[in-house]
Amino acid sequence: MRTTILGPDGKSRCRWCGAAPEFLGYHDTEWGFPVSNDRRLFEKLSLEGFQSGLSWRTILAKRDNFRAAFHDFDFDRIARFTQRDVNRLLKDDGIVRHRGKIEAVINNARRAQELVKQEGSLAAFVWRYEPDAKQLAKPQTASTSTASLALSKALKKQGWKFVGPTTVYAFMQAMGLINDHVVDCVIRAKVERARKTFRRPGR
């Protein structure tokens, strides 16, 4: 089975980005590009948790609604959410109304605050788990890795929820801790250039 498709410009891209109209822009401008912004990292961990058991298309289509509901994923504000906020979110049909996942985001916001106090930033903690390139599987052939297992375990030890190794691996792919664009994808080289000039937090 081919691992690529031709994009509208006639250049090869990862096959998955042809599965839905929303995917192409996300694939070309976000997926795999390295991120050091704490709020964006927290957003992605939260959205990957919401995706558990669902499709990424469902979450991506609702992403603006999630951002509105969770104050653009400002974890200092989310950490102050109360039961009233949980009840409000359970009535919001623009997001995924799953009590456990909503409560996990609130819990994780408080854990994120603790990590910032300990490490200086969420990014400094997360990027410590960037894997060595030699340890990586062939692009898009794995759903977990040694690094995602280690980061998942570390987050769970800190009290985070909905951060299993598969969820964390998807987060690492998206936030640029690994470049998982297939070899023939035109975006792979752009991501690699971005990773080379990216300043790793906390180093």
Image: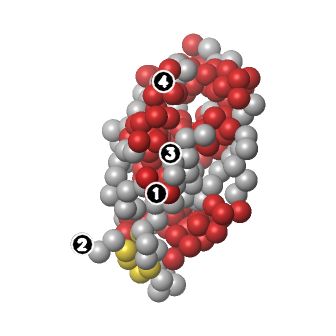
User: In the rendered structure, which disc, 4 or 3, sits on the residue that comes first in sequence?
Assistant: 4
Locate residue 194, reporting x and y percent.
Answer: 65, 64
Q: Amino acid at mark 3?
A: Phe
Specify whether 1 is left or right of 27.
left
Q: Which mark is on residue 156?
A: 4
Q: CA distance from mark 3 to mark 2?
A: 25 Å
Q: Looking at the picture, does residue 168 appear above or below residue 14?
A: above
Q: Give the residue at the far left of this rendering.
A: 1
Residue type beneath disc 2: Met
Residue identified by numbered label 3: 171
Residue depicted at 55% across the width and 46% down the height: 130
**Nearer-the-camera pick, 86 or 49:** 49
Q: Quadrant of the N terminus?
A: bottom left
Residue bearing the label numbered 1: 134
Residue type, mark 4 in image: Lys
- The residue that label 2 is drawn on is 1
Q: Secondary structure at mark 1?
A: helix
The amino acid on which the numbered mark 1 sits, given as a three-letter code, is: Lys
Q: Earlier in the sequence, mark 1 or mark 4?
A: 1
- Mark 1 or mark 2, which is nearer the start of the sequence? 2
Q: Is residue 9 visible?
A: yes
